[in-house]
Amino acid sequence: QVQLVESGGGLVQPGGSLRLSCAASGSSFSANTMGWYRQAPGKQREFVARISSGGFSNYADSVKGRFTLSRDNAKNTLYLQMNSLKPEDTAVYYCNAFPLAYPWGQGTQVTVSS
């Protein structure tokens, strides 16, 4: 069973940057398309970005051009570089396979506020 541990969140001012990490246990990580999702207060969890095992990525329109997804299969780790952050990016961020396949981790809180 794959376990996911997200980290790297925090409080940042609008226009700032953060880099999130997702460490996955288990041997299936490198073979799967992996993604980031987020859940803002009072809203449903939504898709943010995904990356295939070969490195092809795509993004939700709301983050396109600002967020960059990458992965290190040797380390079983997924990354999300977030630049030009906006208050509407405030949410708990989660990683998982795409489509969903694993139990959710605890997520990492990102708060964008001045």
Image (cartoon, grey):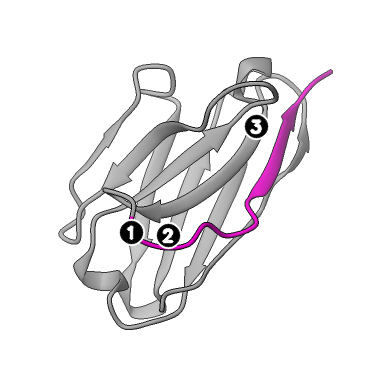
The residue at the point 20 percent across, 69 percent down is 31
First along the sequence among labels 1 and 3: 3
Left or right of 30? Residue 104 is right
Q: Position of residue 8 (x, y in %)?
A: 66, 53
Which mark, residue 101? 1
Is residue 17 visible from the viewing direction of this image? no
Q: Residues within 10 Å of mark 3 (few under 14, many from 20)?
A: many
- Foreground pick, 63 / 104: 104
- Foreground pick, 96 / 14: 96
Q: In the structure shown, which secondary structural element does the residue marked by tag 3 occupy?
A: strand
The residue at the point 28 percent across, 49 percent down is 98
Mark 2 highlights which residue? 78
The residue range painted magenta reads 101-114
Pick the quarter of the image with the N terminus. Answer: bottom left
Q: Position of residue 5 (x, y in %)?
A: 58, 65
Q: Residues within 10 Å of mark 2 (few under 14, many from 20)?
A: many
Report, in whole angstroms, how far the alpha carbon at label 2 lies from the one at label 3.
18 Å
Q: Position of residue 86 (x, y in %)?
A: 63, 18
Q: Position of residue 33 (x, y in %)?
A: 24, 55
Which mark, residue 91? 3
Q: Which is closer to the viewer, label 2 or label 1?
A: 1
- Amino acid type at circle 2 is Leu
First along the sequence among labels 2 and 1: 2
Is residue 86 visible from the viewing direction of this image? yes
The residue at the point 53 percent across, 26 percent down is 44
